[in-house]
Image (cartoon, rainbow, N blue to C red):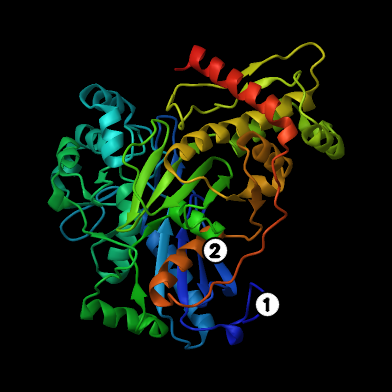
Amino acid sequence: MASDFDIELKDAVPPLVLALDVGSTASRGMIYDAHGRPVGKRVKVPHSFTVASDGTSEIDPDQIVEEIGTIVDRLTAALEGTPVAGVALDTFASSLVVIDGDGAPLTPCFTYADGRCADQVVELREELSEEALQQRTGTRVHSSYWPARLRWLAQEQPEVFAQAATFLSLGDYLQLALTGTLATGTSTASWTGMVDRHTAQWYVELVEIAGISPDQLPPIRHLDEPLEIEPEWASKIAKRWPCLQDAKWFATVTDGLAANVGLGAHDETTIGASCATSGALRVLVREMPEELPPGLWCYRVSHDRALLGGALNDVGRALAWADVTLAVDQIEPEDLSAVLTAEPHETTPLVLPFFTGERSTGWAAGARAVVIGVGAGSAPAEVYRGVVEGIALSYARIARQLREVAPQPEKLYCGGSVTSDVPELLQVMADAMRTSVTPITMRRSTLHGTALLALETLAPDVRRAKPVRGQTLTPDYSRRPYYTERFARFEGVYEALFA
């Protein structure tokens, strides 16, 4: 086994996996070998969502089909006939595409960020017990989930609703277009908000409340259940991509699941943390919690696993606000770093970083950022530190509820652009959460995780290579009293303004 993580084709150990990722800004693809090592070069095709002030956030699903086709063309051409054993795909979660009886799209792909169903969210919150819904599906009533979005579509576009044959996530649509197979992955289905987390099947009562019937939904396939492709479509695939002739295709997974696995957080001992524009803490558990804390979601991702966690709207987004508002470019980088790495001090402003609302743990969508304790002598760098501490405390709020239902994690692996842009955040997170934090420096951990999930079935007994990790940061327990007091103040302000 080669010592380097990235390898060339000549060093690859079969079976090979072709992994695909459809994110918010681009579609990407990569080949991985049996050890989970990237083979050759990654292929990327940029794209963007169409957005508008009314909450519109959508993209043309056929554009994504073309992008994925182009990526597979280029990746398979570089293999020079080397066979691929599996094709695995992840996409951004909580998307919706409506198709007619011939499989043609009746709508664009509505993304997770489309907020036009806000009125329907209010309707459903009046009709349903959100607490009971969360215990059944692992999700709350939210604009990114399907129940409110389907009601909005029925009310705003009844002619489309009347023609609808099947309701799909984007990844389901891609696989239907590429393989002729109608199916959805367990995690992809769960992120619609309409799956019973205990049975891993569609929650029929909620499906009907949303205004559709169960036969308008694709069948659910678990992680170890490859798609069953009809011979006619298998011939089409082999003709276009000969090296995929014998490949197994796996149902689409969500990027959140893939990201956790790609970071190395693939069991109860490890928290996976995403630190990018937004953020999340997640733990993969084998035993489904009977009762969920109110601040968490719980997505069933296969017959034997669930993903438990919470999400933050504003991580990199909060820091970007601080960069501009506090004119951080006017501060010497070493001076800013010194403030962020210094011993914490009670004069640091307290910041609740809800710049675009709150998800976990209080689900206060209308919450906005709060800054307390700014005085005439407060320097911009001190306020910036307050924003960093506020982000870390937001993660700590999720971590506290995670520990109520998951075994005490031994470690936390963290990935995302913010970990390299503002590395000082990681020590503050470690101190606030009282958990060691290890940055994962590998690029495209989500693609890596998608490949690893397929390799569980294709090469279960092959040892996986470990991606490059940065230095582990351990909590400084002398700072515990400071962050205990900060956490209590954070919660007190939150209760007063947003609870």
The residue pinned by badge 2 equals 44
Q: Nearer the viewer, residue 417 or 56?
A: 417
**How many tags in the picture?**
2
Image point (15%, 48%), residue name: 163
Whether residue 169 is visible, yes or no, is no
Q: Could you tell whether 460 is left or right of 228 in the image? A: right
Q: Which mark is residue 67?
A: none
Image point (55%, 68%), residue name: 43
Q: Could you tell whether 193 is left or right of 26 in the image? A: left
Image point (31%, 41%), residue name: 290
Give the vertical position of 99 relative to 35 (above or below): above
Q: Secondary structure at mark 1?
A: loop
Residue 162, horizontal then vertical, whole percent: 13, 43
Q: For the residue marked with disc 2, what is the amino acid? A: Lys
Q: Could you tell whether 273 is left or right of 255 in the image? A: right
Residue 250, horizontal then vertical, whole percent: 34, 68
